[in-house]
Amino acid sequence: MRVRGASQTIRDILCVAVTLAVVLVFLFPVFWMVISSLKPLNLLFSQEIRLFGFQPIFEYYAQIVQVGFLRFVGNSVLVSLVATAACMLMAFPAAYAFSRFRFRGKGVVFSLFGLTQIFPWIILVTPIFIIFFLLGLSNSYLGLVLIYIAVGIPFTTYMLFGYLETIPKEIDDAAVIDGCSATGTIVYVVMPIAVPGLVAAATHAFIVAWNEFLFALTLITTTGKKTAPVALATFFGEYGANWGQVLAAATVTSIPTLLFFLFLQRYLLKGLTAGSVKQ
């Protein structure tokens, strides 16, 4: 028994060590980005690796504030939040319908949702730009929001469908027997239980909208309306880049998604894992 207990302890230690190593590998680039954004220019291009032991500066952050980069971050926050909210309002009823009801063509329609994920976005840029230009939606936040909704709904519906499948349908039946309407069942019974799945799906939709570059670059032509990823690309010149500003801008751009994970991580973990096991 002692030998078995000792071997189990060794396996646990090895598991923790491997997990920490993997976490460090993934976090080190982020750590390096933040540290480098605080280094003086002479240390930024030095061959000597110095993670600590230098006087941090905030010059690069002051520079990106002066050029109005925070405005671009605000544009991204606005577009991403609106697109995420609209995406969730449409995706949740769709996922609920796929999960709870049987109707003709259900499998075909559900498969079409998946087919939308196989097309590379770049082949859609030209036709969408032409259509939006004719409709007067080019160079507008509304156009970007509509694109992000269309892009986010299919996969968001898949995520929510997987989570709703873990919620017993008997809960819906019990709510109806107690006199709850169909809408009331969804809003007051199913949605509170599905909060982890909703958070996971919303986080995915937000990150997709936040990181999107191609459509934002193509549709938005006014400098003041650009989103953070597009504005970040402007720090790269034809013959070089101001790497201090690039690192500072990249650090600031990472903050909103980081806050999402920090405040919603417990719900996010439950939502990502629950849909993989059917109860």
Image (cartoon, rainbow, N blue to C red):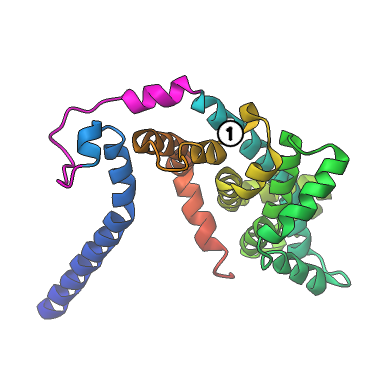
Over which residues does the magenta segment extend? 46-67
| 22 relative to 125 in the view: left or right | left
- Residue at the image point whose x is 81% and y is 68% from the top: 109
**Can see residue 179?**
no
**Quadrant of residue 210 within the rendered picture:** top right
Image quarter hosting the C terminus: bottom right
Residue 60 seen by the camera: yes
Residue 64 belongs to the span the image colors magenta: yes
Residue under the image location 28 percent in, 39 percent down: 36
Q: Position of residue 11 (x, y in %)?
A: 21, 72
Residue at the spot 25% in from the left edge and 58% down from the top edge: 20
Residue 105, percent across and down?
A: 86, 72
Asked whether, in this view, residue 205 is left or right of residue 244, the answer is right
| Rendering quarter of residue 162 | bottom right
The correct choice, above or below, for 211 with respect to 38 in the image is below
Q: Residue furthest front?
A: 239
130 lies left or right of 145: right
Q: Is residue 61 magenta?
A: yes
Q: Is residue 202 left or right of residue 151?
A: left
Work out whether residue 71 or residue 115 is closer to the camera in this orientation and state it: 71
Q: Residues within 10 Å of mark 1 (few under 14, many from 20)?
A: some
| Along the line of sight, the residue nearer the viewer: 3 or 153 | 153
Which residue is under mark 1? 77
User: In percent of the image, x 17 and y 27: which residue is there?
Assistant: 55
Point out the image quarter for the N terminus.
bottom left
User: Magenta stretch mostly in which secondary structure?
Assistant: loop
Three-letter code for the amino acid on which mark 1 is drawn: Val
Please provide percent x and percent y for residue 166: 61, 64
Secondary structure of the residue carrying tag 1 is: helix
